[in-house]
Image (cartoon, rainbow, N blue to C red):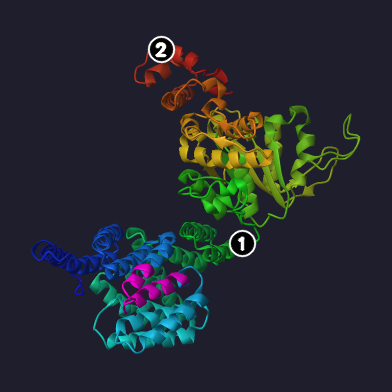
Amino acid sequence: MRLGAPLAAEKHFRAAIHIATWDLNDETEALFWHRDMAVMYKNLGRWQQAKFENLSAIATADAIGCHRESGGLRANLAIVYLKSGEFGAVDALINEAEAFYLRAGRPPEALNNYLVRGRYLNLTGKPKEALELLSNISTELLPLDLPREMAICLEYMGDSHLALGDHAKAASLYQRALDCQNGSKQFGDVVAEVGYRMGEALVNLGDPNGAILSCERGLKVARRTGERYEECASQRILALANWASGNPRKALRNIAECIELARLYEIPYELARALQWYGEATLQSSSPDEHTQARRHLWEARGIYDRLGLTHASRNVDKLLGFESQPEPSTTEPGIEALQGLSNLDGGALRFGIVTCNPEVSEAVATIQSIAPSRIPVLITGQSGVGKEVLAKALHLMSDRRKGPFVPVNCGAVSQTLIDSEFFGHERGAFTGAVSAREGLIASAHQGTLFLDEIGELSPAAQATLLRVLETGELRPVGRDDLRKIDVRLVAATNASLEDLVERGVFRRDLYYRLNGVSVTLPPLQEREEDIRALFRHFWAQAVSASRKKLVLADDVEAMLCAYSWPGNVRELKNEVARVVAMADSGSVVNREAFLPKQRARTAESLRRSREQLTQSTAERDEILRALRAHGGNKAEAARSLGGMKRTTLLYKIERLGIRPEEYLVNE
């Protein structure tokens, strides 16, 4: 194992376990080899195998009453959880290990468990607590001949000082840790671990060349012994050191390798730290593309910290992104509290009012935050009720315009005869009925964000005027001769395909390109089953709290709601929850019959089948529309292009799918 030959090591470990278990009938002896093999898997970044070996050995140790090994194996498993990013399971596991060590009379190796706790406290942002604990452990270790344990204790104490900003003290402790390790064995994980930690301290002390030497020594040992976590971390600190020494190209190669290793071996903590550094280092770039990419890296790092429960690290990233002034959602608020325990809940999106567990929605949020500081227009597409305005409002809150106004406008609801007055304002007496001057919607969004929903509903005349405003930043209110300078961030949204509207001549091509600076799409709710559950819990908790009723929800409700197609999307779900809560009697049990009256007699399975059929029909409708548009509405040609379909069959499908001529005919 120490020579870096894991396959040979695994064979010998397996043989030793077999002999101890079956030939010698000594399960206690076999536990030692299970533990060492688990350590090897942990070093190799094979987390699942490491967990399995530890858990199976724990079951054996507990069954035969070997308390000493029960404690040691749990301490080892806690390290696996720390390195694989399962921080939430660590505290309870350490407490269990301590209880077993106490039953075993607290042998010397019980101190290892306290070392694990010290590491846990450092990683979770409690360096002062960690330092106090580790200082006491170092005192206990002094009279014992345990050089490796002392080295680890000094190493973790160095981590505490590093987190507290005392880099000189950290470097001193790391050197003492190396001295202890060198006196006990030639190789080992301590050399690899301390190598990059010492490197980080030296970078902060202004000695990047010394940091490079320290990291390279540790990296050499990590590669020789197959310790993937340390190899990954060493590349990250080498990036810091090379950047500080004036070699940015090499630094970027180092950090790219670190990120690749972290993704390959699923090392979330190091991945987050690498992404954070990469983002912070390139955030100062003058290139807009690099600036956008830097924010994407920082946002991903923030998401990982959220999943790990490292709120102190998330707050640091928020400062870099400029989000520190945005209040975090309170975990005691009913709608937020109801979301606790949901896997893949996007904490970053939730901070800006977006409840989602869906990767496509999370990607849309990541995209808008990456371009939030710029003025580039954003086009949001998606069905009605899918949450386009919520996403636009999130973009406003993420930008440096958050203190300015957010002005939402439904273009389809504005009278075509008054659209110039509504959008651009008017002077008193400019036309009959203009009894007072009006600023106009665009001017009211000055130094803020203007959200134009259903932008495809704008008349050709309004499109032309809006295009001029976007190009010049000037507008002329109705009844005035002078121009007014305005500064707005435009976000447009549509439930129709603007590309199709452009091809049909309904929407100006030049305006489309002006609006489509960055485009994001929100999928319909029927494609986001995980979001149906999350949003339902969120809306239900809010509605019940507001009604001050005591309601109990039947177990089969969520399954039925998740199977329904929700043609009205999020808006329909929210309204349905509000209706049910309003009609329910306080103290009653709300069952599935209370929801979706038209679907009351149907099972979850039949609802799911209907949803799948609707999805197929939607895909067929889109295919027919594309064919009709491509052939200018000629049904015979469109039918032939659809695999030789008969014209009569196409006519039947057009009628069945409700396809209207205005959806495919081109305006000349």
636 and 611: which one is in front?
611
Q: Quadrant of residue 89?
A: bottom left
Q: Quadrant of residue 385?
A: top right
Could you classify mark 2 by the number of other residues whose Cα lies within 10 Å: few (under 14), some (14-19), or many (20 or more)?
few
Question: Left or right: where does residue 72 sit relative to residue 156?
Answer: left
Closer to the camera: disc 2 or disc 1?
1
Mark 1, residue position: 322
Q: Is residue 452 above or below residue 259?
A: above
Provide residue 43's location: percent of width, then percent of height: 28, 68
Question: Left or right: where does residue 366 sit relative to residue 196?
Answer: right
Mark 2–mark 1 CB contact (< 8 Å): no
Q: Amino acid at mark 1?
A: Gly
Q: Quadrant of the N terminus?
A: bottom left
Mark 2, residue position: 649
Query: Which residue is pictured at 71% across the width and 30% down the height?
Result: 413
Whether residue 245 is visible, yes or no, is no
Asked whether residue 487 is drawn in magenta, I would say: no
Q: Quadrant of the C terminus?
A: top right
Determine the secondary structure under disc 1. loop
The stretch of residues the image draws in magenta is 98-121
Q: Is residue 357 above or below residue 609?
A: below
Q: Amino acid at mark 2?
A: Thr
Provide residue 537's location: percent of width, then percent of height: 55, 41
Determine the secondary structure under disc 2. helix
Provide residue 127's location: percent of width, then percent of height: 50, 75
Provide residue 504's location: percent of width, then percent of height: 56, 27
